[in-house]
Amino acid sequence: MKKKCIANKRGIALLITITVIMLFMTVAVELNWKMRSVVLSTAAMRDRLMLKHMASSGIHAGMAMLISDKHQTESDSLQDNWADPEAIEAVLNDMPFSGGKLTLKISDELGKIQINALVKFPEGRLFNNFQKMLWYQFLTPLKSRAEIFKEMEPISIINSIKDWLDSGDNEAITGLGGAESAYYGSFDPPYRSRNGPLPHLGELVLIKGVPHELFHGLGETSEISKYMTVYGATRSKGNKLTYEGRININTAALPILAALLPLDQQELAQSIYDYRAEISKLENTDALADPAWYKNAPGFSGIKIEPKLLTTRSDIFSIESTASLNEMKMTTFAVVERRKEKKSGKWICKILNWQTK
């Protein structure tokens, strides 16, 4: 009986010992996991901070290139260093980052259709008829690109956008298809027209008649947001904002070049595009200084683009900087405006928008 009691006590002691050992092992594993998590979390945090610094540095490198370009030439074209991948790569290679990779893309915002130029600001009541024509010539060819766009009415879309922008919210709607706040107030939830310039592109999809598929793209049809901008404001007399809507013919994409031409002549846009590419290979930067250079393109004898739609100068650019490090990525997107400081006379880049993803 005594031996059995001793054996039971030894068994209990063994169980206690095993339990304590398992407890210590659990604590050790838990501590080890937490330490590893802390280390990994710290490393991830370090990498994110590094990525943020790298992406931000890329934006400032792009701004420096744009300022340097302003000192070299008055016009802006795809000949310039800011549009040259090799020139950009050379600048990035000089940046002191020991690890990771940085890529940079600079685009001209004034090579796009300026949405807010559709209405004559600062009064904000009347159509800019040249811009109205540009919109019509841009939207109409899209009807044949996809089945869903066949029933699309370009004039109705243009009228709705005009009503969204204009300041006459209590006045009659514009033509067929227009819409003021009374129309949007019937939705759930209700909302109102902007009655002023669009602050961001995404607002377009709130406007009557603008299909989501048109804004975001569908199949072979690129999203129209690629060819639109809300930037381009200048100061009129009295220091009020206005939008000229002039498009830089030196940087405009092919669909925008086509929209500058009447519908029955839009196939000639490729001729402008190809001719511009040939000129861009030359060292003569003055060849694209005059907006009327398109008249020298094959097939353009006697054809005229409305001069009030054209420019060869730009001072508003978007810069996209992407940093990569240890399988992590971070992209910073900025829109900047080149301007000359009144006091110092120096060119600077003012940041209009800054986003990090």
Image (spheres, helix red, strand yellow):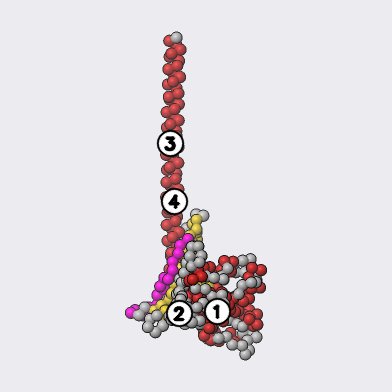
Task: Indicate whether 93 appears above or below 138.
Answer: above
Q: Which amino acid does label 2 sit on?
A: Gly
**Which stretch is magenta?**
343-357
Kindly identify which residue carries mark 1: 175
Kindly identify which residue carries mark 4: 43
Q: Which amino acid does label 3 sit on?
A: Ala
Instruction: Name which of mark 3 and mark 2 comes first in the sequence.
Output: 3
Q: Is residue 344 magenta?
A: yes
**CA gap, disc 3 and disc 4:** 22 Å
Q: Is residue 260 magenta?
A: no
Front-most of residues 297 and 153 = 153
The picture places residue 39, in percent across and down from the top left corner, at 43, 47
Instruction: Name which of mark 2 and mark 4 comes first in the sequence.
Output: 4
Q: Magenta part mainly helix, strand or loop?
A: strand
Residue 348 sits in quarter: bottom left
- Disc 1 or disc 4, which is closer to the eye? 1
Count of marks, rendered view: 4
Front-most of residues 62 and 109 = 109
Identify which residue is drawn at 45% across, 26% down: 18
**Could you say which disc has been placed on residue 124 in the image?**
2
Q: Which amino acid does label 4 sit on?
A: Ala
The picture places residue 144, in percent across and down from the top left corner, at 66, 73
Identify which residue is drawn at 46% across, 69% down: 192
Q: What residue type is labelled 1?
A: Gly
The picture places residue 103, in percent across and down from the top left corner, at 51, 65
- Disc 2 or disc 4, which is closer to the eye? 2
Instruction: Name which of mark 2 and mark 1 comes first in the sequence.
Output: 2
Q: Which residue lies furthest to the bottom in this view?
A: 302
Kindly identify which residue carries mark 3: 28
